[in-house]
């Protein structure tokens, strides 16, 4: 996984990792709150990503009727699914063997 930095063993996710997490979560259609918790985002971060993903055609914003109420859900589009698949392919091409040390991984990514 490509990351921004490593501090105390905790990896920071880059934008692509966050986008893929949002898209994976919303494959079956999810409400905003569910996406926020599943993707481990703050409310502010979620409000930054969702509109952009909708504008670019990776997510669609739907209203579904549940009992008497309508709920807004976000659902991953075919374009979003293709993005997930492409990202996973790229990740597998860039990945190091599972037995790599943190130092080896850090050195690998710092070479770019």
Image (cartoon, grey):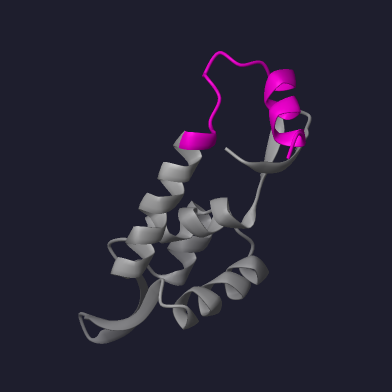
Residue 85 location in percent, x, y? Answer: 36, 51
Could you tell me if residue 109 is visible in this image? yes
Could you tell me if residue 26 is visible in this image? no
Image height check: is 5 above or below 54? Answer: above
Q: Is residue 112 left or right of residue 97?
A: right
User: What are the residue bounds of the magenta stretch?
Assistant: 93-112
Which residue is pictured at 31% across the width and 61% down the height? 27
Query: Quadrant location of the N terminus?
Result: top right
Count of all numbered marks drawn on residues in the image: 0
Query: Quadrant location of the C terminus?
Result: top right
Q: Is residue 21 left or right of residue 2?
A: left
Which residue is pictured at 47% across the width and 55% down the height? 20
Of residue 90 and residue 59, the one placed in the foreground of this image is 90
Q: For residue 66, which quarter of the picture?
A: bottom left
Q: Is residue 78 left or right of residue 97?
A: left
Q: Is residue 6 left or right of residue 97?
A: right
Query: Is residue 106 magenta-colored?
Result: yes
As drawn, the residue found furthest toward the front would be 112
Which residue is pictured at 52% across the width and 59% down the height? 19
């Amino acid at each position: 996984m490509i990351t921004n930095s490593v501090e105390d063993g905790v990896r920071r996710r880059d934008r692509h990792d966050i986008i893929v997490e949002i898209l994976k979560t919303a494959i079956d259609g999810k409400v905003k709150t569910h996406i926020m918790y599943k993707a481990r985002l703050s409310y502010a971060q979620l409000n930054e990503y969702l509109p952009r993903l909708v504008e670019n055609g990776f997510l669609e914003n739907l209203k579904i009727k549940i009992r008497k109420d309508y709920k807004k859900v976000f659902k991953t589009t075919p374009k979003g699914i293709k993005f997930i698949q492409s990202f996973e392919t790229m990740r597998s091409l860039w990945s190091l063997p599972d037995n790599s040390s943190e130092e080896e991984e850090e050195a690998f990514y710092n070479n770019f």
